[in-house]
């Protein structure tokens, strides 16, 4: 071997060793693994493209299904635990909260990153990693639910409390900001093409935003966006549009000693049941019109699930699927799985969880309900494997729901 060839080989070996060492750096490894995962999924979907959300299977009406009049009467009997505030003081034209140190999210980590920035406003000194290590220890886990964010605050930042509600509006956000409470909302974002699942990807995804200011003269909010950047602005109208697919969900963090103030700011929405009742009434009114879209019907289904009106909820979700939903919808919201399971529509449950697994393989919630569908079908081995997969994705999933499910077949 000539000295020149030997030197080239030694140089290549050195470069390979350097690449291996650089790959061991956690930040580099995380980003490279994520890019390799995106490439793997993209390639898979080139070969077997993701189709549209499947429509519902034919349904035979159940004679025993409660009538709408009966269930509406039951809901209407709910009474507030706090006195609703009839009127609120006029709000200032602008209000702002000092922006926290910006935290760029790591892959699939907008929930922990947004919560981290918010907690910094209350004296917390951790990072998104501290949060994700507890509530989503596997990087590939694509979603964090508001229940998980609340769990983290209540167990790891016990000097604070977190509440979330649905059916929010622009005035509610402004009222909280004017009282110096930052607001987190779950809304839609457009993904970068580099994050596409495949050539037919609609690039639609859920995203948490931290809202820190508003300005009526410009009709816009200031947001901290862990995906796109700090101190960005979004118009009131755009936020309303992006917020709707998630039932206008909002989260507020506060010191427990100020709970009475938060109750006053939220009025009747402080009571979770009344909050849902109001959201349900609004959804019913909208879906009674010809202008209702898929998100209106989906939100109606989710509000009906809250009140365990599963047969009605399933029909609302059917309508949303018929109109058309984005392919990632079931990465973030799982009401249809509950509705189809509890209404006895197991074929629809399996059809939808199969589709959701094809879009997002790393979803503990999907694997859990897919397992229940298999279990009801009599495939106990398949159910056990599905629940084991759910536990592997998130060992702390809903206080070990997957482990409890596995006890059914062990």
Image (cartoon, rainbow, N blue to C red):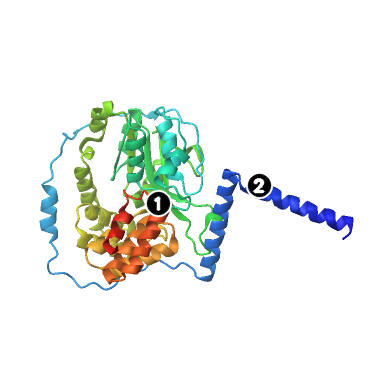
Q: How many marks?
A: 2
Q: Which residue in the structure is indicated by mark 1?
A: 394
Percent x, y for residue 206? 41, 50
Q: Which residue in the structure is indicated by mark 2?
A: 21
Up-down relation of residue 90 to residue 324 (above or below): above
Residue neighbourhood size for the residue with mark 1, other residues' Cα within 10 Å, grouped as few (<14), some (14–19), many (≥20):
many
Up-down relation of residue 275 to residue 70 (above or below): above
Q: Are marks 2 and 1 in contact (CB under 8 Å)?
A: no
Q: Residue at x 13, y 54 (%)?
A: 72
Percent x, y for residue 410? 29, 62
Quadrant that contains the N terminus: bottom right
Q: Which mark is residue 205?
A: none
Q: 86 and 157: which one is in front?
A: 157
Identify the image quadrant of residue 321: bottom left
Q: In the drawing, does residue 124 fall left or right of residue 34?
A: left
Q: Residue at x 47, y 59 (%)?
A: 202
Q: Residue at x 38, y 51 (%)?
A: 395
Q: Measure how far apart labels 2 and 1 are at the Cα level.
A: 29 Å
């Amino acid at each position: 071997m000539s000295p020149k060839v030997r030197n080239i080989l030694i140089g290549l070996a050195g470069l390979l060793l350097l690449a291996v060492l650089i790959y061991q750096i956690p930040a580099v490894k995380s980003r490279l693994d994520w890019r390799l995962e995106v490439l793997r999924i993209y390639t898979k979907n080139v070969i077997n493209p993701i189709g549209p959300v499947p429509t519902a299977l034919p349904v035979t009406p159940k004679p025993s299904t409660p009538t709408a009049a009966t269930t509406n009467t039951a809901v209407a009997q709910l009474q507030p635990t706090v006195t609703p505030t009839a009127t609120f003081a006029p709000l200032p034209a602008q209000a702002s909260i000092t922006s926290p140190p910006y935290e760029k999210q790591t892959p699939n980590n907008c929930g922990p990153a947004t919560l981290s920035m918010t907690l910094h406003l209350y004296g917390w000194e951790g990072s998104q990693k501290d949060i994700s290590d507890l509530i989503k220890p596997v990087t590939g886990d694509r979603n964090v639910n508001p229940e998980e964010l609340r769990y983290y605050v209540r167990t790891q930042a016990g000097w604070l409390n977190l509440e979330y509600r649905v059916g929010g509006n622009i005035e509610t956000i402004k009222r909280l900001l004017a009282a110096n409470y930052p607001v987190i909302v779950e809304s839609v974002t457009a993904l970068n093409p580099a994050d596409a699942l495949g050539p037919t990807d609609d690039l639609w995804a859920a995203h948490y935003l931290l809202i820190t200011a508003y300005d009526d003269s410009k009709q816009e909010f200031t947001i901290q966006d862990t995906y796109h950047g700090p101190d960005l602005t979004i118009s009131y109208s755009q936020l309303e549009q992006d917020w709707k697919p998630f039932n206008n969900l909002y989260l507020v963090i506060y010191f427990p000693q100020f709970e009475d103030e938060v109750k006053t700011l939220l009025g009747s929405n402080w009571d979770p049941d009344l909050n849902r009742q109001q959201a349900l009434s609004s959804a019913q009114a909208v879906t009674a019109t010809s202008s209702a879209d898929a998100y209106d019907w989906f939100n109606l289904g989710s509000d009906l699930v809250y009140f365990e009106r599963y047969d009605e909820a399933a029909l609302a979700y059917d309508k949303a699927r018929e109109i058309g939903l984005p392919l990632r919808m079931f990465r973030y919201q799982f009401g249809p799985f509950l509705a189809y399971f509890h209404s006895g529509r197991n074929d629809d449950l399996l059809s939808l969880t199969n589709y959701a697994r094809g879009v997002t393989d790393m979803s503990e919630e999907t694997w859990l309900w897919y397992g229940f569908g298999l279990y009801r079908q009599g495939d106990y081995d398949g159910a056990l494997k599905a629940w084991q997969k759910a536990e592997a994705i998130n060992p702390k999933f809903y206080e070990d729901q997957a482990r409890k499910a596995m006890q059914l077949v062990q």
